[in-house]
Amino acid sequence: MGIPERLQGVKRVFLDTAPVIYYVERHPEYAALVTPVFDMIDEGGLFAVTSPITLAECLVGPCRNLQQTLRDAFRQRIIGANNTVFVGPDASMAQQAAELRATYRLSLLDCLQIAIALGSGCDAFLTNDLALTCVKEANVIALCEAKAG
């Protein structure tokens, strides 16, 4: 099943780091999978949530390689895009992240991302990290599953 089909009925999607990188950098293998999602967001058919973690992870490469234009493109997509809200973790999200980490033994950053998504009312969590699909509390959509299917 493709990504647009998996997003049927979804009103708010959390954007993990990989989908944003694939879209902004026009990844040769994954851009075709994520472009329809970003088109839906830009057109108002889908609302996106991003986080400081997504921003920081996306900016590492451009900071390392002194690519100001790419830094600006990531900041615009994550912080300034239409139909997108930038949400930082609060105390209840931190608590939920701890509970997720205790249950699933995932990294704290991954658990914070999922907790932000859940705390922000997201119906889906778009990632390319197959390990996150074990989280039962969230509707985790892994790009690699759609690509294989």
Image (cartoon, helix red, strand yellow):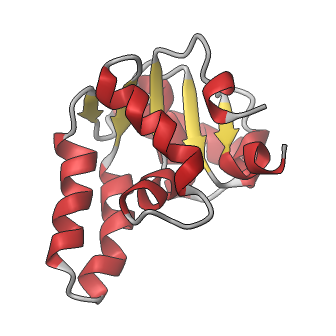
* Direction from residue 98 to residue 47 in the image, left or right: left
Residue 138 figure quarter: top right
Check the image and report above or below for 17 versus 95: below
Check the image and report above or below for 79 versus 138: below
* Direction from residue 111 to residue 68 in the image, left or right: left
Indicate the position of residue 25 as horizontal and vertical percent values: 39, 66
Residue at (39, 33) in percent of width and height: 39
In the picture, the quarter occupied by the N terminus is top right
Residue at (25, 81) in percent of width and height: 63
Name the residue furthest top: 9
Residue 142 figure quarter: top right
Check the image and report above or below for 51 versus 96: below
Indicate the position of residue 136 as horizontal and vertical percent values: 75, 29
Residue at (22, 60) in percent of width and height: 73
Residue at (54, 20) in percent of width and height: 123
Residue 105 at least partly seen: no
| Near-viewer residue (35 or 80) | 35
* Direction from residue 58 to residue 111 in the image, left or right: right
